[in-house]
Image: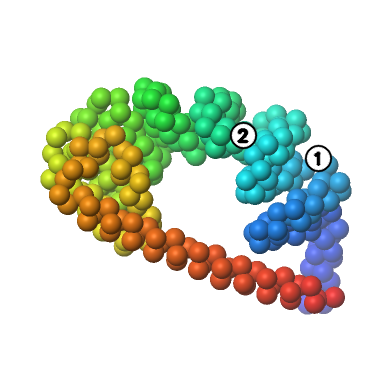
């Protein structure tokens, strides 16, 4: 037993000796970033980079922290620095796409995702992101292609199925759009996305009462799932435009607004509670010699 204990202690000591010297700085930076103390987080990540300049992940964390702080120029520069360190750093390519999209430069965002998907064709998030950007740009054909591949990769993913149906609807293929939305309904009948997609399709087909019923069902599911359903998305949706004068629409929009505000309040309270716990944990760590 004593020999076993000594062996385990030796292994632990060996593991501690092999720990990257920048890991404590990374852990500290993560805590500070979660607390919204962005400058201190960046300083911690930079301290880690000084010890381990080859760790691209620290440069990525710096970029992400700048992005969280809304400092897009610094985030862009930091992600480009990460690419200099590793030209195939997927997180950096995705980050640069996010910066371009935030600036409203959809074409640039799509180019960054093109590069990412050349490196990693199986990156499902990047695939769906590029499909969504194609929809925003009015390139329905490209959106269909990306979402079709996403569905091939993960045929049970609600976002992939909803995106595929939406792309087909935008491409003028309501029959296959219906198939995608109905498949989503069969595989995940509790998701608001299936009802919402079918509502858009019904509105496009000139069936306002059916579309309203489906929108009301989408709200019911959103309430159960405790997820947002923003009325501004409904108002800005070109396929739902025929419903704006529907007599039940004002009440539905008001209900959606109340629900969205309730979810936002819940999320804010949860974030405050998490922040309080992190601060307490940080105080405890500071007292530990």
Alpha-carbon span between mark 1 and mark 2: 20 Å
The image quadrant that residue 9 belongs to is bottom right
Residue plotted at (72% across, 70% down): 282
Which one is earlier in the sequence, the residue at label 1 or at label 2?
Answer: 1
Residue plotted at (25% across, 25% down): 172
Mark linked to residue 54: 1
The image quadrant that residue 28 belongs to is bottom right
Label 1 or label 2, whichever lies nearer to me, is 2
Image side of residue 186 versus residue 247, left or right: right
- Residue 131 position in % (x across, y down): 43, 31
Residue receiving disc 2: 96
Quadrant where the N terminus sits is bottom right
Residue plotted at (24% across, 37% down): 241
- Residue 251 position in % (x across, y down): 22, 56
Few, some or many residues within 10 Å of mark 1 (<14, 14–19, 20+): few
Considering only vertical position in the picture, is 157 above or below 271? Answer: above
Considering only vertical position in the picture, is 55 above or below 229? Answer: above
**Image label count:** 2
Q: In the rendered structure, are the residues bearing label 1 and label 2 in contact, judged by CB atoms less than 8 Å apart?
A: no
Of residues 9 and 229, the one nearer the viewer is 229
């Amino acid at each position: 037993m004593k020999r076993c204990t000594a062996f385990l202690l030796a292994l632990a000591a060996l593991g501690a000796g092999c720990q990257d010297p920048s890991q404590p700085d990374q852990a500290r930076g993560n805590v500070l970033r979660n607390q919204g103390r962005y400058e201190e987080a960046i300083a911690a990540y930079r301290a880690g980079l000084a010890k381990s300049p080859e760790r691209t992940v620290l440069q990525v964390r710096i970029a992400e922290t700048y992005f969280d702080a809304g400092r897009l120029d610094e985030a862009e520069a930091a992600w480009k620095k990460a690419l200099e360190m590793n030209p195939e750093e997927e997180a950096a390519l995705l980050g640069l796409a996010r910066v371009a999209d935030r600036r409203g430069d959809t074409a640039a965002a799509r180019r960054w995702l093109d590069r990412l998907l050349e490196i990693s064709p199986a990156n499902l998030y990047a695939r769906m992101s590029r499909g969504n950007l194609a929809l925003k740009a009015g390139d329905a054909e490209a959106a269909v292609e990306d979402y079709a591949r996403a569905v091939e990769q993960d045929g049970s993913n609600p976002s992939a199925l909803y995106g595929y149906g939406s792309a087909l609807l935008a491409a003028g293929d309501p029959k296959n759009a219906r198939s995608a939305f109905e498949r989503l309904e069969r595989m995940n009948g509790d998701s608001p996305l299936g009802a919402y997609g079918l509502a858009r399709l019904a509105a496009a087909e000139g069936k306002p009462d059916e579309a309203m019923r489906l929108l009301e069902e989408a709200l019911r599911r959103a309430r159960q799932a405790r997820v947002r359903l923003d009325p501004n998305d409904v108002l800005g949706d070109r396929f739902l435009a025929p419903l704006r004068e529907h007599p039940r629409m004002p009440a539905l929009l008001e209900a959606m607004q109340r629900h969205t505000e309730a979810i936002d309040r819940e999320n804010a309270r949860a974030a405050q509670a998490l922040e309080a716990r992190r601060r307490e944990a940080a105080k405890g760590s500071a007292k530990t010699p």
